């Protein structure tokens, strides 16, 4: 009887141990950071990075997708534990959630337009809602045109709704390269944001510690730089 | 799926189209049509039951029951659907987790709402974090069905309430004169005659329900609109099947789907209307009687 009790207690603790699952949420629409590949699964830089971080932190991670504009509220209401969605570290966001160390350096944002003389100072500029780029455009004096998904911001330039789109240069570069000259970068690159970090609930200090340690080890052995090289090419910023 | 699709960038023409249209994400897209149809199939009867109950409550002799019935229809009808959809997912989800929290968690000393964050212990999470992605999808789908049923049930209740009031008083009085009890009049005379008055309103609601299914998207269920937008967007070389902005074609497909659905419903509902009008003391019933002579 005692053995049976012991055995069931062991099974119970084993059950609780495996309950230590961390749910990662991404947007799934922001290549090369994250996107849904043609198999219908989350892919991209953050997929590979996230899996590696979880391995190093000895966490069991599962992936889910969430709309960008509700990604912070749904973290707070506990639908998942980590935001891994190309989210730049800003003071404003740090007031409501906590960020890990950055895993992508502060990168340049750029204007992409249909013509080199597009009016980015006072014209209409599209950006994704709730991004640092949208906040920047709103302050810049240009007319801000917001869209819920990144893809729509570029489509707005193609169909003439906006003079230019303002977003992470890493996201826009493939669109410029593959447009046969129809889309060009305009103006200078602008550095905003404090790099990309994992977003977590402010109360999850233990999880943040584990993630930071794992990110540090990936920075130290160069595997993070190798991943950046793989997904962002030679132009990707390294640590 | 097919051997020829192993290297999508090397193929073109028809083979490319075949491989593209059978990619994993497209199969998910086709599956999402089933999700929408399932939602309709489950929601319609549940909303109908809620509506019938609501109408009965609103007509009840017992005052508190009547208040509940009236309050239910007034509240849901008076607030935009979209607000309910945004409200219910959060309220239901957090409500369920909170009750579970009280039931299974050991440490209840901490408040559930801490600042902006909502906390329940890991065992109280619904579904648990260890659940499969399918369970999460099924759970959001369940929440969606409940939300749709509550919202549409209120409209159904109002339609049925109106239809019950429209049954001529003379019909009920005759039944009473035969000595039928209250319940018998309700079951044998009122309900059978009520449908012919309710049907036009219910038909409308069914059409609106079909067209409201894209709201599933708000409830984080991946429906056909989500996939059409996701698949149609410009795909760069980062994807296996790069293509320009094809959203127009995908949305055109959805347009055809919704038109087919509503057309089909119209045909079926017209038949039902004809059957119900038979022998009724309404203009439609009278026209049928004359045509038959």
Image (spheres, coloured by chain):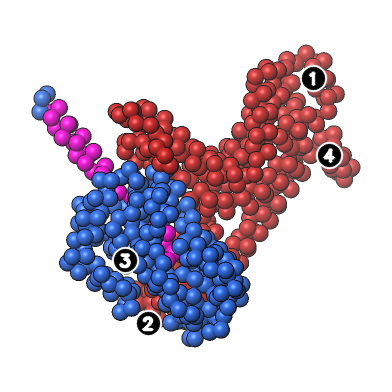
Chain colours: A blue, B red
Between A236 and A46, the residue placed more toward the observer is A236
Query: Within the image, what quadrant is residue B241 found in?
Result: bottom left
Q: Which class describes the residues within 10 Å of circle 2: few (<14), some (14-19), or many (20+)?
A: few
**SS at circle 2:** helix
Judged by depth in the image, the label closer to the viewer, 1 or 2, is 2
The residue at which mark 4 appears reads as B285
The residue at which mark 2 appears reads as B10
**SS at circle 1:** helix
Judged by depth in the image, the label closer to the viewer, 3 or 4, is 3
Q: Which class describes the residues within 10 Å of circle 3: few (<14), some (14-19), or many (20+)?
A: many
**SS at circle 4:** helix
Mark closer to the chain start, 1 or 4: 1
Between A129 and A60, the residue placed more toward the observer is A129
- The mark found on residue A104 in the picture is 3
Which residues are the magenta region? A4-30
Mark closer to the chain start, 1 or 2: 2
Q: Is residue A15 magenta?
A: yes
The residue at which mark 1 appears reads as B175
């Amino acid at each position: 009887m005692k053995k049976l009790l012991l055995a069931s207690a062991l099974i119970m603790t084993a059950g609780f141990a495996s309950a230590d699952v961390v749910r990662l949420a991404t947007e799934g629409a922001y290549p090369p950071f994250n996107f849904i590949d043609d198999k219908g699964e989350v892919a991209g830089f953050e997929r590979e990075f996230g899996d590696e971080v979880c391995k190093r932190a000895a966490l069991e991670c599962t992936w889910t997708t969430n709309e960008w504009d509700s990604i912070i509220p749904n973290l707070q209401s506990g639908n998942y534990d980590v935001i891994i969605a190309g989210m730049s570290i800003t003071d404003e966001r740090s007031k409501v959630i906590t960020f890990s160390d950055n895993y992508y350096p502060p990168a340049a944002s750029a204007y992409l337009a249909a013509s080199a003389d597009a009016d980015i100072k006072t014209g209409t500029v599209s950006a994704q809602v709730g991004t640092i780029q949208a906040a920047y455009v709103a302050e810049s004096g240009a007319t801000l045109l917001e869209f819920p998904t990144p893809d729509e911001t570029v489509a707005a330039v193609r169909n003439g709704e906006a003079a230019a789109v303002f977003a992470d240069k890493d996201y826009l570069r493939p669109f410029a390269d593959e447009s046969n000259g129809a889309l060009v970068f305009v103006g200078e690159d602008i550095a905003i944001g404090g790099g990309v970090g994992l977003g977590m609930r402010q109360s999850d200090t233990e999880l943040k510690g584990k993630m930071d340690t794992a990110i540090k080890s990936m920075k130290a052995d160069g595997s993070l730089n190798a991943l950046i090289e793989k997904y962002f090419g030679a132009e990707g910023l390294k640590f | 799926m097919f051997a020829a699709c192993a290297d999508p960038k090397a193929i073109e023409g028809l083979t490319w189209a075949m491989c593209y249209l059978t990619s994993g994400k497209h199969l998910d897209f086709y599956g999402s049509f089933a999700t929408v149809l399932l939602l309709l199939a489950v929601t319609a009867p549940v909303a109908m039951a809620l509506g019938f109950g609501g109408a009965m409550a609103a007509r009840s002799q017992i005052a508190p029951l009547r208040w509940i019935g009236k309050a239910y229809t007034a509240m849901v009808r008076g607030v935009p659907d979209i607000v309910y959809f945004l409200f219910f997912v959060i309220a239901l989800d957090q409500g369920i987790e909170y009750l579970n929290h009280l039931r299974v968690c050991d440490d209840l000393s901490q408040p559930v709402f801490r600042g902006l964050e909502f906390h329940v212990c890991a065992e109280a999470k619904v579904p648990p974090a260890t659940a499969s992605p399918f369970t999460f999808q099924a759970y959001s789908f369940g929440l969606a069905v409940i939300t749709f049923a509550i919202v549409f049930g209120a409209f159904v209740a109002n339609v049925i309430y109106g239809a019950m009031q429209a049954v001529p008083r003379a019909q009920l009085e005759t039944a009473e004169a035969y000595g039928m009890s209250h319940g018998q009049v309700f079951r044998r005379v009122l309900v059978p005659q009520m449908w012919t008055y309710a049907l036009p309103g219910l038909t409308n609601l069914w059409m609106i329900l079909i067209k409201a299914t894209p709201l599933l998207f708000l409830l984080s269920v991946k429906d056909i609109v989500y996939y059409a937008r996701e698949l149609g967007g410009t795909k760069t070389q980062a994807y296996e099947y790069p293509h320009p902005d094809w959203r127009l074609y995908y949305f055109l497909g959805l347009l055809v789907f919704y038109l087919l659905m509503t057309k089909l419903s119209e045909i079926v509902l017209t038949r039902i209307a004809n059957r119900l009008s038979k022998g009724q003391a309404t203009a439609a019933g009278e026209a049928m009687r004359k045509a038959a002579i």
